Amino acid sequence: MKIALVTGSAGLIGAESVRFFSKKGFEIIGIDNDMRRLFFGDEASTEWSRRKLESEIKNYTHYSEDIRDRASMEDIFKKYGEDIKVIIHTAAQPSHDWAAKDPFTDFTVNANGTLNLLEMTRQYCPDAAFIFTSTNKVYGDSPNSLPLVELETRWEIDKSHPYYQNGIDESMSVDQTKHSLFGASKLAADALVQEYGKYFNMKTVCFRGGCLTGPGHSSTELHGFLAYLMKCAVTGRHYTIFGYRGKQVRDNIHSYDLVNAFWHFYQKPRIGEVYNIGGGRHSNCSIQEAIEMCEDITGKKMNYLYTESNRIGDHIWWISDVSKFKLHYPAWKYKYSIKEILVEIFQSGVFNVK
């Protein structure tokens, strides 16, 4: 028996991982205690997603446990042992705004929880691949010091800069920068994942994501940019643009494309690896451009307001350079563009889920 253990299994990337790896013949162990409801309220709850997984995926077993609880994690890892072939760790407190309200919870979920999972992997299934969803926030606000040029609908990096062609690569420093407390807790986890790989010769990887998106997102104002924007576009809910004249740029990667990258890594894992991963030059937009696309898709004008105050540590421009991952895994390709992502979110009707 081969098992894929997925934390945050009812969330956007977790649920995509469950479906993807179950189709590859894995038994799936899902761990998710719906802390997203605690973080962001009832509309962000992933209970609906868990129910769908349990009804649709026959080889799925769910545990409503907290990754901070070392004893319960040990019970699960001990039970399945070396049948666990891959750990896909997506559970997290994902908002830099929320982290400032409760730093203890943010850090213990993101850092201590990751440590628990790494140590259980080392003890009970050390040959398994350990895949961690890190974040571009490990680089703090260093991207804001790049030479940016203001265009009509977006900020863009100066064409003479090395990052212009493909985006920001893994050589950017994580030092001497404002990370947000969320960025700091994820950086601690990121360093642990690397260290367990390098120190204990384990097959670990950090995928430093930009905006991860798709119709499986239980979106809310503080997390889930594209899905929340489309929710506002469809329902007429008010949307607030925070600073930078709405020209801040994000690359957006569909959950399927990211999990497909996980699959490629699993088939040929490396030791203590790090990749920037996102939509890259293939799939990116500014908030202004995203609003225009939402209005075009829905046929409705959006109800939005602009405020000059930007979020602390927010990136003005982020496009991931995925060249390193493509070099190591040349068979991996994007399936979704930014417009295709928005159309799928709209057609899914997921914004109506309660």
Image (cartoon, rainbow, N blue to C red):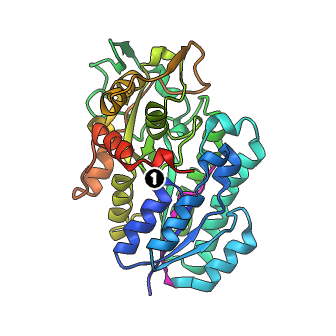
In the rendered image, which quarter contains the N terminus?
A: bottom left
Q: Is residue 39 visible?
A: yes
Highlighted magenta segment, given as a residue range: 83-93
Q: Quadrant of residue 41?
A: top right
* Helix, strand or loop for disc 1: loop
Q: Is 212 part of what is drawn in magenta?
A: no
Left or right of 215, for residue 185: right
275 lies above or below 181: below
Tell me the residue at 62%/78% (across/down).
Answer: 77
Q: Residue at x 50, y 27 (%)?
A: 315
Residue nearer the viewer, 224 or 166 = 224
**Above/below status of 75 relative to 259:** below
Residue 110, horizontal then vertical, whole percent: 65, 52
The residue under the point 47% across, 27% down is 143
Residue 307, given in percent of the width and then of the height, sits at 57, 14
Estimate the x, y position of residue 200 in percent, counting from the top left: 55, 68
Residue underneath mark 1? 216
Q: What's the residue type where badge 1 is placed?
A: Gly
Residue 87 in sight? no
